[in-house]
Amino acid sequence: MCRLVSKWLVTLDQIGLMLKDMKHGLAVVLVTALFSCSNDNLTTSIALEGNWVDIITRTDTLTFGLFGDRESLVLRRGKEVRDGFLLPKDGSGSYDYKVLTDDKISLRWDLSSNSKFNDYYFKQYGDKLTIEKFFDTTTAGTMLTFKKLD
């Protein structure tokens, strides 16, 4: 009888060790999962969400938000007459975006035949943001400043 009980106790010890190993393994998996999580656009897009107006032209606006099922940046540049028609200025429209670092944003214009993202300078300071002029390649390197409206 003692021999049967001692075998049973050894088995409980082994089960205890297995549970301890499983707890350590689960802890390692959880810590790994937490550190591997990405916050692609999450905290940045919450701060960016809304309407921004160019502080100089007061006609160019940026809107960061959820359009359909994806986050986008919409540039509205006012209108101009071309070939007798009142049309949005060049570069107006929707852009896919990725905030890459504290000072860089990657943009892809939805109406472009080029599916490549291009990187531009980008820095937000509270209710102001500075962005490299991305919609006019003839003035590359020009910086624009926008102020948040809402």
Image: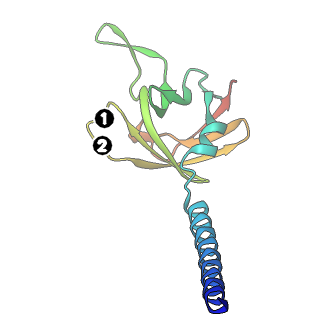
Pointer 1 local density, CA inside 10 Å: few below 14, some 14–19, many at least 20: few
Q: Quadrant of the N terminus?
A: bottom right
Q: Residue at point 64% right, 37% down?
A: 46
Quarter residue 114 falls in: top left
The residues tagged by marks 2 and 1 sit, at their Cα atoms, a distance apart of 7 Å
Pointer 2 local density, CA inside 10 Å: few below 14, some 14–19, many at least 20: few
Determine whether the residue tagged by mark 2 lies in a helix, strand or loop: loop
Instruction: State whether residue 83 is above or below residue 35.
Output: above
Q: Give yes or no for contact between labels 2 and 1 (Cβ–Cβ under 8 Å).
A: yes
Q: Amino acid at mark 2?
A: Ser
Residue 52 as seen in the image, left or right of residue 137: right
Q: Residue at point 62% right, 83% down?
A: 8
Q: Nearer the viewer, mark 2 or mark 1?
A: 2
Q: Residue at point 59% right, 78% down?
A: 18
Instruction: State whether residue 123 is above or below residue 29.
Output: above
Query: Residue 83 location, x and y as percent?
Result: 28, 11
Q: Which residue is mark 1?
A: 112
Determine whether the residue tagged by mark 1 lies in a helix, strand or loop: loop
Query: Residue 102 location, x and y as percent?
Result: 62, 53
Q: Which mark is residue 49?
A: none
Query: Which of 43/126 is in front?
Result: 43
Quarter residue 91 falls in: top left
Q: Amino acid at mark 1?
A: Ser
Query: Residue 99 location, x and y as percent?
Result: 53, 48
Residue 54 as seen in the image, left or right of residue 92: right
Query: Which of 81/101 is in front?
Result: 101
Q: Which residue is mark 2?
A: 115
Query: Quick one: which residue is furthest to the top in this view?
Result: 84
Query: Quick one: which residue is furthest to the front in this view?
Result: 1
**Residue 78 visible in the current orientation:** yes
Query: Residue 12 location, x and y as percent?
Result: 64, 80
Q: Quadrant of the C terminus?
A: top right
